[in-house]
Image (cartoon, rainbow, N blue to C red):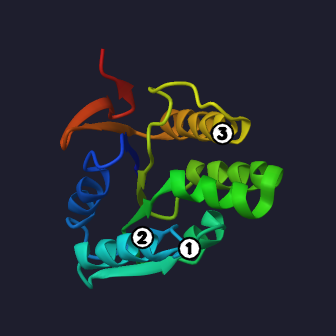
Amino acid sequence: MKQVTLITGGGRSGKSSFALTMARRYAKKAFIATAEPIDNEMRERIDQHKRDRDPSFNTIEEPLNLTAALLSLPSETEAAVIDCVSVWIGNCMHHDGAKENSAIRGFIEQLKDPPCDLIIVTNEVGMGIVPDNEQSRRYRDVLGSLNRQIAELAQQVILMVCGIPVYVKKNGKGME
């Protein structure tokens, strides 16, 4: 059975590094990048992420259609890292406004029967103060809802805290 692992946490908590470490145990792996180089700072982040992963990753850059990216993976792919869902939701909201719900539904449906093991990176954005504007609150709400849906389907959920993985769900069961 193909596994879905969700890795969440705050900014710079080690999510992407941990996802890459998990994926390196697979021979045939892919990296689905969602970031768009919208400014110099983002270009530098993207370049650093490229340097962080070795050439054994088949990289797919897809800022909007994660379902299509998953369907385009070569059949021999054993695992794919999606980095990251929080950037993807921002892209969807920026490009499509309120239409991101159909993209989310399609992605969630794809997770029910993934083409390979998936390691999904996202940010936990609901543990801080309530944003002071409607757009930021909407982003937090949409991402929080999506994170819950992914976590429900995932066999593993890992919260990164200061570079340390804390298993919230393992083998399909919460860690009580």
Residue 38 is marked as 1
143 or 132: nearer the viewer: 132
Amino acid under label 2?
A: Glu
Question: Do callouts 2 and 3 mark residues in contact (Cβ within 8 Å)?
Answer: no
User: Residue, x 40% and y 50% (percent of image)?
Assistant: 3
Furthest toward the bottom, the residue is 55
Image quadrant in which you'd find residue 140 = top right
Q: Is residue 76 above or below residue 7?
A: below
Q: Which of pointers 2 and 3 lies earlier in the amino acid sequence? A: 2
Q: Which residue is mark 2?
A: 41
Which element is circle 1 on? loop
Disc 1 and disc 2 in contact, CB within 8 angstroms: no
The residue at 56%/73% (across/down) is 38
Tell me how far mark 2 sits from mark 3, CA to CA.
25 Å
Task: Characterize the local packing of mark 1: few (<14), some (14-19) or many (20 or more) Cα atoms within 10 angstroms.
Answer: few
Amino acid on which disc 3 is placed: Val
68 or 159, nearer to the observer: 159
Q: Which residue is mark 3?
A: 142
**Residue density around tag 2, few if under 14, some if 14–19, many if 20 or more, within 10 Å:** few
Contact, CB < 8 Å: mark 1 with mark 3? no
Name the residue at the top extreme: 176
Q: Earlier in the sequence, mark 1 or mark 3?
A: 1
Image quadrant where residue 93 sits: bottom right
Counting from the top left corner in percent of width and height, residue 24 is at: 22, 67
* Type of amino acid under label 1: Ile
Q: Position of residue 134 (x, y in %)?
A: 73, 35
Q: Residues within 10 Å of mark 3 (few under 14, many from 20)?
A: some
Label 2's element?
Answer: helix
Disc ID at residue 57: none
Taking the image as shown, residue 6 lies to the left or right of residue 35, namely left
Closer to viewer: mark 2 or mark 3:
2
